[in-house]
Image: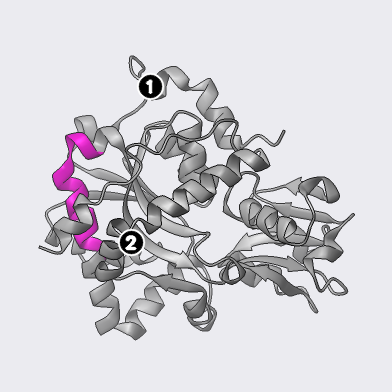
Amino acid sequence: MIRRLLIAALLTLCAACGGGGTAATPSASSKAVTLGFSAWPGWVPWQIAQEKGLFAKNGVEVELKYFDSYTDSLTALATGNIDANSQTLNDTLASVSGGAKQTVVLVNDNSTGNDQIIARPGITSVAQLKGKTVAAEQGTVDHYLLLLALRKAGLTQADITFKPLLTDAAAAAFKAGQVDAVGAFAPFTTTALELPGSTAIATSKDFPGAIPDHLVVTREFAASRPEAVQGLVKTWFDTLAWIGANKAEARTIMAKRAGVSEQAYADYDAGTTILSLADNLKAFSSGSLERQAKEIAAFLTESGLADTAPPLDGLLDPRFVQGASS
């Protein structure tokens, strides 16, 4: 059975995560909120919030922590070493399945093409991956996308040779011709597509709503520091407004943080659909997030990415997007 790296970490740190433990909780003794994020176009705007003083405007002191490895950011939140993190719904559910107490307080975006399965020349469909070697970061978002694409093509992971690598290493290995295909998210898709003749044979655009991206906090933090969570959420929408009024400067900042050219960053626009405050209010109130969570939870257990079905009670907390509208 496929076992997620994060789940393994949670099992070894169970006592620290769940009452009576001694996991690091920076916010318990410090005013600053530790907020994690990675190189995904829907999360890089946090860099603008920091550089333009938008956190302070909303009365919250933030230690912004950038993770080169997305998996490390998931583990940091699950083990209490940061207060909040930018992560996908499926990765949040996998963490919850492993015992983490987390809650979604904001929808940053939906992936609409920037998560991709990219194949070498000569492979033009997912069905042609049968018997081939495919790399992805085990247990995280693009492993999930790979399994969705394989299922749609009538295949399973048993039909391929799966090579677990961190996303940056997976993209590099593909570019070097060491694997036949790779699952990666932007900006690492740019690296993979540098292999001449390579092409995306499946993307998150093919699975609408399957990969929503969120701001997620520990439940303890939401309960003990609700004013800080509210400050983070308000800052996000202020950041979107700033980006809208300063598009050129915003792109420069975000491209630099992502480590790509401004043109490459511009090319990501269509593949990441940022949700407005109105979109967030609708997502939380319409039941669409709950439906997505149920569908993803079922898939995670059926595919072996989670050993047990994650409990959904307490997963979604709408009060902070509601507070941002007042």
Q: Position of residue 241 (x, y in %)?
A: 23, 75
Q: How did the renderer colour the structure?
A: one colour
Q: Tell me if residue 126 is in the magenta stretch.
A: no
- Residue at horizontal 49 percent and vertical 63 percent from the top: 209
Report the amino acid beneath label 2.
Ala
Q: Is residue 219 left or right of residue 117?
A: left
Q: Is residue 191 left or right of residue 26?
A: right
Q: Position of residue 204 (x, y in %)?
A: 58, 66
Please tell me which of labels 2 and 1 falls first in the chain. 1
Label disc, if present, on residue 283 of the rendered structure: 2
- Residue at horizontal 40 percent and vertical 39 percent from the top: 312
- Residue at horizontal 59 percent and vertical 43 percent from the top: 300
Q: Nearer the viewer, residue 256 or 157?
A: 157
Q: Residues within 10 Å of mark 1 (few under 14, many from 20)?
A: some
Eyeballing the image, is 116 above or below 14? below
Q: Is residue 61 visible?
A: no
Q: Tell me if residue 229 is in the magenta stretch.
A: yes
Q: Nearer the viewer, residue 99 or 264?
A: 99
Q: Which residues are magenta?
A: 222-236
Q: Position of residue 157 (x, y in %)?
A: 77, 48
- Residue on which the image places disc 1: 18
